[in-house]
Image (cartoon, rainbow, N blue to C red):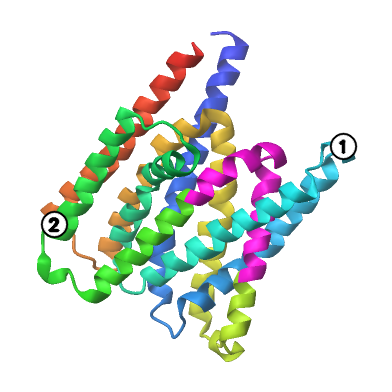
Amino acid sequence: MSSNERHTARWRLAGFALSAGGAMLFALKGILIKLIYAYPIDATALLAVRMMLSFPVFLTVGIVQWRRRPPDLRPEATNMALAALIGVLGYHISSWLDFKGLHTLEAQTERLILFTYPFLVIVFGRLLLGHPLRAHALAGAGLSYAGLIVMFGSDPARLTSAMLGGAALVAAAASTFALYQLFAREIIMRCGPALFTAIAMCAASVTTVGQFLLTHDMTMLALPRHAWTLMSGLAIFSTIVPTFMMSAGTARIGAQGTAIISTLSPVLTIILATSLLAEPFGLPEAAGTALVIGGVALFSWLDSRRTAAKSG
């Protein structure tokens, strides 16, 4: 093996490790939120704290990225405004719906519902932009949504109005995040991934904190030290660190490789949810999980093969 081949192998191995680490850290999000909800705090306040703690890091990244670029390579004001609006959609509206849904929905179920968003990207792409519907996407979606039906239909007694309401909110979060992904692609190309992420996160931080200040009293944040430790962990280890790890991993192994590695995320969420939160997990949950993950993995694998065949 030549030195260039060894370098490429190490580069890709690092990409897989970064993507896997990022996926695992993202898996902690629902667990941490459920633990934080043991304290008197709601979705709006918790999301505001998460974004306030993350804001300085993303602002610094944005400033550094802006200064590194020659003036003629900096994005236009219109593209920056679009990045900000898309960021509000993905990191404020979608996140708020997700946080709100976790009040009444189990963390493992929340993760699996969110995990189906790639199929919604395809549906919205067809409806809004006229993108083609691929057979492998429909096959993967069929498997994944069959898995959700198995999970929800296995025990009708668990289908309370609160649980169904939480599931609807998380499904709305998946839908808005799919729209974010769809609209973000072109703007990311114009701004660059790091600068786009910085602008999007900073804009979402401003609107999220603004929502909190308009609707809440600051006394809601007078929480015990342990609650603040958990909220700091949510901001650092389930927001800042995995965001950069996933970006670095994608740069090394591509979006499809990252998507396949991300199938680790719901598995780890389930392990943590059953061990730390005592959430139920039996044969129906196992079957449903296998179908959801299998559907997404099938779609990602077939899509990567189709892309490779076209480029070859």
- The type of residue carrying mark 1 is Asp
Q: Is residue 42 above or below residue 304?
A: below
Q: Position of residue 224 (x, y in %)?
A: 51, 85
Residue stretch rendered in magenta on the structure = 179-207
Q: Is residue 236 magenta?
A: no
Residue at 44 percent across and 47 percent down: it is 23
* Residue under label 1: 72
Q: On the picture, is 127 further left or further right than 139?
A: right
Q: Secondary structure at mark 1?
A: helix
Asked where in the image residue 157 lies, by quadrant, the reply is bottom left
Q: On the picture, is 211 further left or further right than 136?
A: right
Q: Is residue 280 above or below residue 131?
A: below
Residue at 35 percent across and 59 percent down: it is 171
* Residue under label 2: 282
Whole-angstrom CA distance, mark 2 to mark 1, is 58 Å
Q: Secondary structure at mark 2?
A: loop
Name the one closer to the observer, 272 or 93.
Answer: 93
Asked where in the image residue 309 lies, by quadrant, the reply is top left
Can residue 198 be seen? no
- The type of residue carrying mark 2 is Gly
Q: Position of residue 191 (x, y in %)?
A: 71, 42
Residue at 45 percent across and 31 percent down: it is 257
- Sequence-earlier tag: 2 or 1: 1
